[in-house]
Image (cartoon, rainbow, N blue to C red):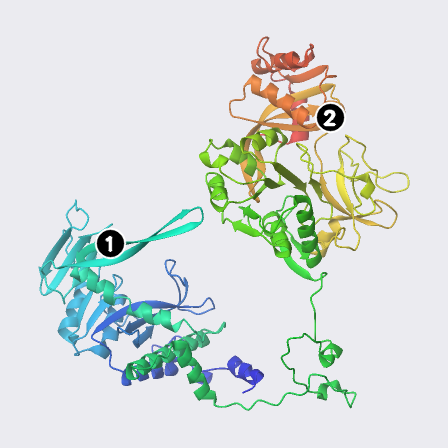
Amino acid sequence: MPRDRFLIILKFLHFSDNSLKECRDSPTYDRLWKIRKIFECFNRAFKEVYDPTENLSLDEVIIKFKGRVLFKQYIPKKRKQWGIKMYKIADATGYTYDMRVYLGKDKLKENLSPSASYNVVYTMAECVKDKDHKLFMDNFFSSPKLFHDLLTEKTINSCGTIRSNRKYFPKDLAPKKMKQSDVAAKFCNGMTALCWKNKRHVYMLTNMHSPKNEFVVEERKRCKRKFEDEVVECGIKKLTTTKPKIVADYNKHMGYVDLGDRMASTYTFTRRTRKWTKKLFFSLIDIAVLNAFLMFKLNQTKSNFSLKEFRMNLITSLIGNINSKVAEPSVTPKLKSNDDTKFSHWPIDEKKRRRCACCAKKDKQKRTTIIYKLLYIYTSGTTGINKAAIIRHRKCLFIGAITQYVSRLGDSEVIYNPLPMYHSAGGLIFVSVIFIFGGSMIIRKKFSTSNYWKEVAKHKATVGQYIGEICRYLLNQPVREAEQQHCIKLMFGNGLRSHIWKEFQERFRIKNIIEFYGATEGNANLVNIFGKVGAVGFLPRVCDRLYPVSLFKVDPDSREVLRNEKGLCIRCKTGEPGELIGKIINNPINSFDGYVNQNETNKKIIRNCFEKGDMAFLSVRHEYIGGASIKSLCFDVRKDETVQQISGHRKLTSQVHAALIDERGNKYTGHKPLTASESAKEIAQGIIKFTKSYNMSLQNLSVIGCDGTNLNTGWKGGVIRLLETCIGKPLQWKISKLHTSELPLRHLILEMNGSTK
C-alpha cells in the first residue's frame, strides 16, 4: 500500500456509523459508542482463546491522551498524568484477560452498589467466577464487603492493601506505638486483617491466608559504588528483610497489570492523534499483539523469539511480499517534454551526496543557510512586555565564535551552567561554543547558592557562568570547604557589581572574569576582556568601520537622542552619559533581526544616526554619570520596592538604599544599596564607594544636602561629619528641617527616583 493511501485511510478511520448515534439524554446512551463494537470484539477474543493462571491482578492503567474527551482523567501521581483510564485483569505472564474503560460517573445511578470501585471489581470478576482464582488488588478497590461477596457469590479468593478508614474494617487494629517489623492481626468470618509496621503502617486484608502470623525472609542485593580519583569500586552487599507472608505474596502477584502494560509499550503502535477513538484503538492493537506473543511463547517453549522479532514476522505475514520497482540510473536523463510533472525518477542510495536535477529544477530541494531562523528567545521584559526575538543561524555562529575568541577555551573545558536554558545567557552563549568547537557542559535545573561550589568541585568544572546577583549571593554565603577545592579558572557573565568584584575574585580564587554587555536581539554588544573592575567593555575607535557602535547623547528629560545641525546623532565625550547605539549592516556581526512583531522591531530602529540614510539599533540608556566632578550633592536614605534580575528572572524585593542627586541641573546620580541597620558609618562609606566605583571625584565637593535627622547631622558620628573627615575639608551644610522645609528636597528626590513605600 502506498504511503499516501495509508495516511488517507488513517485520516478517515471510523469504527461506527454516525447516523446511528443515540441522543445524549437517552437512558441507554453509551459514551463509548464510537468504538464499542471493536472494543467488545477484542475483549471477547481475549477470553475465548486463553485460560488464565491461578493468580490474577486487577489494577488501573492510563492511556496517555490530552485531547478532548468527556471521560479524560487527571491523576497527578501517575507517570502518565492525563489520559483515558482503563481497568485490567492480567495473569502472571502479563496477558490481559479482561478490560474496561472508565466512562465517568453514572448519571442515573441505577446501580445501587456501595461504591464505584466495588462495582468495577464485582462486574469484571464475572469472567473468572467459580474457577477458584486468587485476585490481588490495591487499596483503591479493597473493602471487607467486596471480599466477602467475591468469595460467597463467585468463589474468588482476594488479597490486597486496604485503607484503614474502610467500612467494617477494625479501627483499633494497630496499637498506638509499634516498632519496625511489628505485626498486629485480627481474624473474623474467614478474613484476616493485618497491620505491619515497616517505614509506615501497612494495612492488609485477605481471605486466602492463614490467620497465623507467618513470616518470609527475603534476600536482595545492593551494589555500593565509591568514586575516588575516577576509579569505580563496586561491592555487593546482601540484605535480608523479614515480612509477613501476606505482604510477600501481594508484592509478588500485584504487578501483573503493570508488567503487561510495560511490555505492550515497548514497541508501541500508537501514533500522535487528537481523536480519542484512534488512541484507544492503537492501544487495543498493542494489547492484542502482546497477548498473541505470550500465547506463542506458551506453545513454543523452545523458541527464543523476542517481542521485536515477533512483531516483525507478524508484519511480514500481514503485508506479504512486496515487489519493489527497479531503480533507474543515478544520472537523471534529459526530459523529452517540457512538462516536468510527467517525469518520474527513483533515487539510489549512494555514499557520495549528489543533487537531483529534477528536484532542483522544481525548487523542491531546500537547503538551510545561515540566514534561516534558528529559534525564538523571549526577552525578559525590562523595556515592556516579553517579545519573541528572532535568532538566526548566523547570529548563533557569531556568538559562539566571538565567545571562543575572547575566552580562549579548549575542547576539554567543562562549563558549569546553572542558568535557565530559555535565557540567551544560559541557552545560547556557551551552548553554541560547544556545538562549534567542542567541550562539555554541566546543566543544573535550578540555581543553588549552597550547592554551587560543591557541584563545581564534584564535576571538575573549569568555567562558570553567572548573571545578575548570582555573584553577590555566593559572596554572602558562609565560608565552605568546597570553595578551595574547585578548578574554576574563568567566570563569564554580566551583572557583577564593581564594589564586590575584587572581593569575589580573591575569596574564590578566580583567575579571570569576563564581563559582557548586550541585548539578546541587539547588535551593540561589549566585552570586558582586560578584567577592568566595574567595566562591561570598551569601544575601540580603530574598529569604527568594522564594528560601528558608540555612545550618543540623549535629552535627560525626554530621553530622546540629541541631533546636531546636520540631523545626525551627537557622540558622547569621555565621562558623558548616553545611549549605546549600533549601526545596522547586513552581515553576521552588525545585523538586527528584530522581533516577530514588526511594530516592536520598528520601535528599536532610528535613522540618520551615524550618517544620512543609515539605520541603527537603540540599546539601553546609561543612568550613571561617570568621570564627573561633583560640587553639590544631596542624599536621602529610602526604602523602595526594587525590581532585581535574579538568575534570569525579574523579582520584586524591598531594598534600603541611599539616593544621590547632583544639584547642578538636578541630575540623578544613582543609589547605593544598604543593609537594614542604616547606620551613619555605612551610609558614608556607601557614598564614598559608589563615587569611586563610577570614577566620580569628591575633591571639589563644597555643598552637602540632606534632611535634619541626628543620623545625618550628628556633630561627632553623623554622615556629614564622616564625609568631611574622609574628604579632609569642611563642607557647607544644606539642611532641610522636618517637615515643612524638607518638601522641596523631597519633591526633587521623588521626581528623580520615584515614590517610596
Q: Please tell me how crowded label 1 is: few (under 14), some (14-19), or many (20+) other residues with Cα within 10 Å.
A: few
Whole-percent x, y for residue 226 in the image: 38, 48
* Residue 132 picture quarter: bottom left
Image quarter (top left, top right, bottom left or bottom right) of the C terminus: top right
- Whether residue 376 can be seen here: yes
Report the amino acid beneath label 1: Leu
Report the amino acid beneath label 2: Asn
Camera-side residue: 458 or 95?
458
Residue at image point 14% right, 66% down: 207
Left or right position of 77 against 385: left
Image quarter (top left, top right, bottom left or bottom right) of the N terminus: bottom right
Relative to residue 710, is residue 438 depicted above or below? below
Whole-percent x, y for residue 338 in the image: 79, 87
Relative to residue 580, is residue 430 depicted above or below? below
Q: Residue 666: which disc?
A: 2
Q: Please tell me how crowded label 2 is: few (under 14), some (14-19), or many (20+) other residues with Cα within 10 Å.
A: some
Camera-side residue: 743 or 510?
510
Q: In the image as oriented, which residue stretches furthest toward the right?
A: 566
Q: Which residue is mark 1?
A: 239
Left or right position of 72 against 742: left
Whole-percent x, y for residue 517 in the image: 68, 41
Camera-side residue: 307 or 635?
307
Find numbered disc 2 in the image and state the secondary structure of the residue it sits on: loop
- Whether residue 640 can be seen here: no
Residue at image point 57% right, 20% down: 682
